[in-house]
Amino acid sequence: MSEYIIYLRLPPYLAQWLRHENERIPIEFPKNSMENDIIELGLIRKPILASVPGPGENSVAIAIPNFKKKDVKQFNYLPLAARRSLQQCIRTRFAIALWKDLHKFGNIGRRKQDLIYAWMEAHGIETSDKNWNTIAKIYMRKRDAYRKSPNKDRSKDG
């Protein structure tokens, strides 16, 4: 494990999910993962006047792995654009996990509310109304994208 850590702020549901999915704190992403690729690509030397985000509410500690091409003793600062890319990557992984688990044939006919609450509990997410509403909205957007007919938006030109 690296002695260098970055703190990444995430929405509460996402921070809770990410901590639950990873056995270690600080979080260590798998070798060759997209998250580590983003970190490696984004790491720079810390600018003189740059502030380093520290621990805080809804932030997760992420260990900076050792990279062959970048010495983490020198390159250990993740600028805002790279942080946003990392956040988006984590959000995408979350959405894929949510979709994979909830959109199954066996879940047809079961109450969506109960399914989402059960999924939240199984993935270490606090079962608050705010978290439920956010996760339900993410799921519904994904589901609705597949419900639309591919020809629905096209005009009827005889």
Image (cartoon, helix red, strand yellow):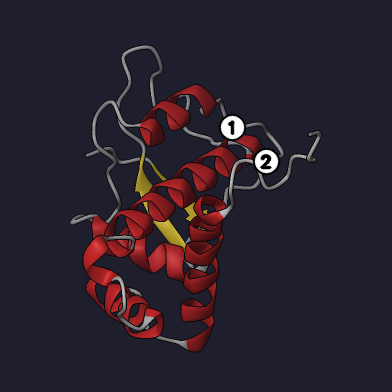
Callout 1: few (<14), some (14-19), or many (20+) C-alpha neighbours within 10 Å?
A: some
Identify the residue at horizontal 78%, vertical 40% (top origin).
156
Residue type marked 2: Ala
- Residue 124 figure quarter: bottom left
**In front: 115, or 155?**
155
Answer above or below: position of 43 versus 128.
above
Residue type marked 1: Lys
Q: Which mark is residue 37?
A: none
- Whole-percent x, y for residue 107 in the image: 27, 70
Identify the residue at horizontal 48%, vertical 25% (top origin).
75
Answer above or below: position of 142 versus 130.
above
Identify the residue at horizontal 51%, vertical 28% (top origin).
43
Q: How far apart are the alpha carbons under marks 2 and 1?
A: 7 Å
The local secondary structure at tag 2 comes to loop
Q: Return the residue found at the far top.
A: 69
Numbered marks: total: 2
Identify the residue at horizontal 33%, vertical 75% (top origin).
120
Q: Is residue 142 left or right of residue 61?
A: right
Instruction: Residue under label 1, please give it.
Output: 46
- Quarter holding the C terminus is top right
Instruction: Residue under label 2, please give it.
Output: 50
Q: Check if mark 2's residue and mark 1's residue have beta carbons within 8 Å.
A: yes
Q: Is residue 135 left or right of residue 141?
A: left
